Amino acid sequence: MHPAAGGPANYESTVGDIGIGAIYPIFSDRVYVRGQAMYRYDSHNRRDAGDTGKDGFYEAVAALGLHVTIGKSPATLAAEKEAEEAALVPVVQDSDNDGVNDDADACPGTARGVKVDSRGCERDSDGDGVLDGSDQCPNTPAGQPVDAKGCSLDGDNDGVLNQMDQCPNTPAGAEVLADGCALTNDCRIPQPGDQVDADGCAVTQAVILRGVNFDLDSARLTPNAKAILDTVGDALLSIESVNVEIGGHTDSLGSNAYNQKLSQRRAESVKTYLSERGVDASRMEVKGYGEAEPVAPNDTAEGRELNRRVELKILE
C-alpha cells in the first residue's frame, strides 16, 4: 500500500557539500566582492510503506555578491589593537642621546658627543670645577686652585699663586719667598729697567720684601710683615750656604739723619725676627740706607710707599 495522498511520509536524506569561495576588497577595506561555487549531493531517500526507491539528486550552486562591513573596518580594529599593545610597553626616551634616560638626566640639554657622568651631566675628570669640554689643563692635581680655563693658579706648585709669582717656574721643592722666588737658581720676571741674562731672567742685586711693613714711625713689625718673613726664614734655612744683607730704606719725609737711623733700626728688627726663627745671625748683615736709594718718586703717596721697603741682597 501507498499512503493516501496528503498523508504522512517518511524520508531519509544524506547531504554532502563541497565548494570553494573567495572574497576580495574593492574601493576600500569595507567593501568586498565575494564569489562562491558549491557542488551538493542529496540522497533524499523516501521510505513509504512498501516503497524502497531512491530519489537522490545532485546540484551545483554558484553565487556572486558584495560584502559590506558595518562598524569599524578590519584595518581600524588592527590599528587599535596595535596601539593598545604598544601602550603596554614602557617608552624610554633619551632626548639628548647621552646614554642617560630623560627621567634620570639632571642635565637634559647635553651637547652631542660630550661625555657625561651617571647623572647625565658633562664630566669634570680632574675634579677642579671646570668641565672637561672647557678644561685646557685636564690633569690638574687634586686640590689645586684653577682659573676659568681649568689651569692651575700655581703653575710651579711653590705655594704662590701665578698672579703673585715673580718666578713662575721655580724648581720643584725649592723654598721660596713671598713673591714666589727662591733665593738662588731661579728665574725672576724682569721689571722695566732691569737687566736680563741669556735666559731672559732679571739680573737683580736685591730682592724687595714687599709687604714687610712697620708701625708708623717705628721699627715694630706688623703681623703681615712677620708672615712674609716666615717664608724668608724657611728659604734661608733650606740653603745654609747663602749669606744675605738686609737693607732698610725710607721715603724722603723727615731729615736724612733721622731716616738713616730709622732704616737701620728696621733692618735690625728684621734680622732679630729671622734669628728667632732659627737663622744663624752670622749669616745676616744689616745696613740702613735711609732715603738715599729711592725706587720711585717721593712726590706722591704711592711713590713714597714703594720707597719704604726692606731688601734682601745675596752676598757672594
Image (cartoon, rainbow, N blue to C red):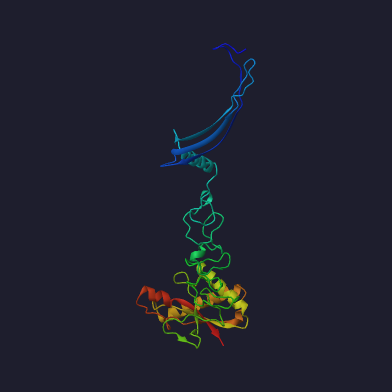
Q: Is residue 5 above or below residue 71?
A: above
Q: Say which residue appears at 37% left-offset and 73% top-offset.
A: 301
Residue 216: percent from left, percent from top: 44, 70
Quarter the C terminus occupies:
bottom right
Q: Is residue 52 above or below residue 260?
A: above
Residue 118: percent from left, percent from top: 56, 55
Q: Is residue 241 above or below residue 57?
A: below
| Outermost front residue | 1
| Outermost left residue | 299
Residue 68 in sight in this render: no
**Frontmost residue, 76 versus 70:** 70
**Frontmost residue, 243 versus 248:** 243
Residue 174 figure quarter: bottom right
Residue 151: percent from left, percent from top: 51, 69
Left-right relation of 186 to 76: right
Residue 264: percent from left, percent from top: 49, 79
Q: Say which residue appears at 52% left-offset and 36% top-offset.
A: 37
Residue 84 in sight in this render: yes
Residue 52 figure quarter: top right
Q: Say which residue appears at 49% left-offset and 35% top-offset.
A: 62
Quarter the N terminus occupies:
top right
Number of marks: 0
